[in-house]
Amino acid sequence: MSTHLTLGTRGSALALCQAEMTETALAGHCDLTRQVIVTTGDKRTDVPLAAVAAASGVVDKGVFIKELEVALLDGEIDFAVHSLKDVPTILEPEFEVCAVLPRAPTGDILITRGPSLLDLPSGATIGTSSVRRKLQLLHLRPDLKVVDIRGNVPTRLQKVVDQPELDGTILAEAGLVRLGYNTQGELQTENGDTLTAHLLDRAEFLPAAGQGAVAMEILKSNETAREILAAINHEETMIRITAERHFLALLQAGCDTPVGVDSQVVDGQLRLFARVFEENGSHTEARAEGPATQALQVAQSLFERLA
Ligand SMILES: NCc1[nH]cc(CCC(=O)O)c1CC(=O)O
């Protein structure tokens, strides 16, 4: 085992956990060094993400990605580990997502001091910075108030404990599972406070494309890294995320475009279901199905049915 790779990751608890999962998967395949890199999105947790992106000149959700791509170009790291959801659908030509770990559950979870979505008092306030989550919430509960919220997973949970004016937040099931939180019923925060997790039905509250997937990004020119990482690629996850991201690219959806997409592979068939949400609370939806070996074509037909 003479080959050595340097892994680049952000420093958040979730990012470090995902780096560790990747290191575990690669054990026996190569020697590894971990390099923690602070990204633009990590530096300013007090202002909305859109403002961080605008001020730094970083487009879209590249705020969590840019410094890792610079480290790839500089040869400081061989590959970057990302939450795929944070990776822009269309990469600069020198980069490639070459492998993904087995996908975690893709749902979203409402966290409150007790009540479920339907039991929240009229006019209750939910914190989320995602337009996709906001519009789906307002579709189900038009009376709710949605406010911006920033910070990593533990910070957001603590805000629900500490801020009486904030009745809840929505987080990805994947992140909570990986960090060891309960995702159904009582949930203990880092400070030992108790909140309640309500798993939202994935057919009714659609995830973001790529949600729950951990991806390896390399320079296309790095053959060695590609070859080694191929050994840990999870094929079914790659098929699903390829279809979801191709669909998004066809829609030319940017970071905050409110699109939800759910995918499944059953008996070699790839099934896609998508919704595009409008600011007025309505949505359009479509389904497509086809051989899992033809992920791009299935995504294309989903796009055509929606357009
Ligand atoms: N934008 C932040 C982000 N990026 C990935 C995840 C969760 C893990 C995942 O979806 O893979 C989160 C937090 C959240 O949405 O709750």
Image (tube, rainbow, N blue to C red):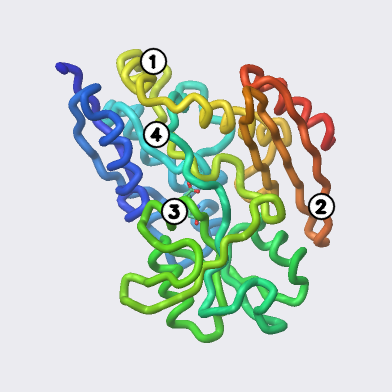
Quick check: marks 4 and 2 in contact, CB under 8 Å? no
At label 3, which amino acid type do we have?
Answer: Gly
At label 4, which amino acid type do we have?
Answer: Glu
Q: Earlier in the sequence, mark 3 or mark 4?
A: 4
Say which residue appears at 80% left-offset and 39% top-offset: 286
Say which residue appears at 55% left-offset and 40% top-offset: 210
Quick check: marks 2 and 3 in contact, CB under 8 Å? no
Q: Earlier in the sequence, mark 2 or mark 3?
A: 3
Quadrant placement of the N terminus = top left
- Relative placement, left or right, of 257 versus 67 is right
Q: Position of residue 49 (x, y in %)?
A: 52, 58
Tag 3 residue: 175
- In the rendering, which numbered label is found on residue 283? 2
- In the rendering, which numbered label is found on residue 221? 1
Distance from mark 3 CB to nearest ligand 1 atom below 8 Å: yes
| CA distance for labels 1 and 4 | 14 Å
The answer to whether residue 196 is above or below residue 249 is below
